Image: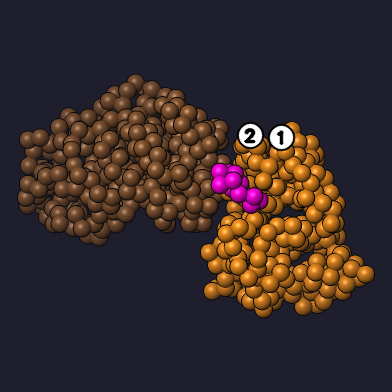
Chain colours: A orange, B brown
Amino acid sequence: MTPAARQIRENIIRVSQHSGHGHIPTCFSIIEMLLAVYGEMRHDPARPDWPDRDIFILSKGHASLGHYTTLAQLGYFPIDEVYSFGAHHSKFGCHADRLKVPGIEASTGSLGHGIGLGVGMALAFKLDQSPRRVFVIVGDGEANEGSVWEAIMVATHQQLSNLTILYDNNGSQSRCMPIPNPAERLAAFGCDVHEVPGHDEEAIRCALRAPANSVRAVVCHTEKGHGCKTLTDDMFAWHRRSPKQEEAARMLEELHASAV
Amino acid sequence: MRAQFKDTVTELAKTDSRIVMVFGDISVYLFRDFWQQWPERFFNAGICENTLVSMAAGLASQGFYPFVHTITPFLTDRSYEQIKLDLCYNEFGANLLSCGASFDYAWDGATHHCYTELAMLRRLPGMEVMQPGSKHEMDVLLRSQYANGKPSYYRIAHDEHGEAFTPEFGKGIIVRDAGAAVTVVTAGPILGNVLKACADLSVNIIYYHTLKPFDYDVLTKFRDTRMLVVHDAFGLHEAVMELPDLRVRYFGLPDQFNCFYGTLDDIRSDLGLDPAGIRQAVVKRIEEVQQSAVSPTVS
């Protein structure tokens, strides 16, 4: 785990403990994916509305705390502000509002909307003959939604090589309707598929840089709660639970131990 | 009216390169000239209404003016959440144009009927809701609203009311001010039947082509009269009722599926929304008002 990835996870634990909100395990599964995307995409924390920027959409919007803490790490806003997470007048809702938070391009929360939005944006960039790219993180649970696959079919039909889907294969649906072979399914829908260890930032970045003839899909094999034994041992119990002070302290210790 | 949509948009597209079509495999032959002229701006995207709306939101977010078009229930009922979240909550504007409501596809049965969308879409913050009653109204409203950055819904009808108004977005029209005790309030093409029904009746008539924003100034002028909302859909009655302390009756649709086929006129006739049925309802309302002079509890 890189220092940045560890710092972001620490902030997630602290903000969640302070606010009483947050889906920690699902945030922990995407930190390397987020760092890889922001490492590759054109963006400027000082100018969130820079007209030439690439676009990132967190379609699994309940991982917003992971997104906020990553944006804070990158300098979009001070981490102190994120401690208001979920509070009445906070900018930082448990699902992000693009009109409130710099760096948020789409307000998400209901699952299955992000790829369709990304399709429209990618089409717009093609029409404008712009080199801008669109990146969308979807969850494996979210991929139960038909609208995910509907949008992928449209995207591949429109040959949107400027659209990248990062598929967070964190096993969240093991008790419900798992999708055992996401890479095969995405390939069958016409995507250029890459499969990578989802906590290897450099491997993800390589996949994001590889040339693509169609929609690029990067299946990231991840772990809910990655870096904290407490979370990985019982991910369903912690799905939407915030740690008490002593639990948070234990998680921080585990995080440091796993980072060594 | 659908041909008018095509004519208006085709003309606008000549000078506005940000106009793009997002179609659900309907009216494609009608738009063949548009497609031929600007293939890069014509997306017959597929029979996938959720994605049509989401991708329109994405296009709008980058400064395009998308026109999403397909059959009413599939566009509005099926994709209500995409309209609510991707367009309205995100504040990405797009134009939604549906065909088939309420009973324009009468012969296709209840799966293709749609009469709740005007009421449902009115409830979405930021949404503009229009039910043009003529080709001219479609033309004027489309030109006026398509590029304002808001989500705008236009219901395209097969029939027209036959009147030549000078429409203005958001404004109701006083069709007749007879100084009468009863005011008939209506919207969309059904005005044609209302006018036939009321030809020799002493009633005032207000007509709406825009259901949101709703012109309460026009309504307020008649607030001391007894009102009868005649509408072959839901939405207008609810809009009228938002003005407090009115005395209103609704004559329109029952709380049940219409499981019959045939033509639009057949269905309207079944529902009493043909001129004869509307006349009966208006006469009843007039009689109620006359009785209220004796029994003031009648509202």
The correct choice, above or below, for A195 with respect to A35 in the image is above
Q: Residues within 10 Å of mark 1 (few under 14, many from 20)?
A: some
Residue A190, labelled with which disc? 1
How far across and down, in percent of the image, does residue B68 sit?
Answer: 46, 40
Q: Nearer the viewer, residue A142 or B27?
A: B27
Q: Nearer the viewer, residue A213 or A169?
A: A213
Q: Is residue B208 visible?
A: yes
Q: Nearer the viewer, residue B61 or B277?
A: B61
Q: Residue at left 51%, top 33%?
A: B39
Seen as rendered, the residue at the extreme top is: B262
Looking at the image, residue B244 sits to the left or right of residue B55; the answer is: left
How far across and down, in percent of the image, does residue A18 sit?
Answer: 69, 76
Q: Which residues are magenta?
A: A122-134
The correct choice, above or below, for B91 with respect to A126 in the image is below
Q: Earlier in the sequence, mark 2 or mark 1?
A: 2
Disc 2 vs disc 1: Cβ atoms closer than 8 Å?
Answer: yes
**Amino acid type, mark 2:** His
**Amino acid type, mark 1:** Gly
Seen as rendered, the residue at the extreme right is: A260
Q: Nearer the viewer, residue B242 or B41?
A: B41
Secondary structure category for the residue under label 2: helix
Q: Name the residue beneath numbered marker 2.
A: A157
Q: Mark 1 — on which chain does it sit? A: A
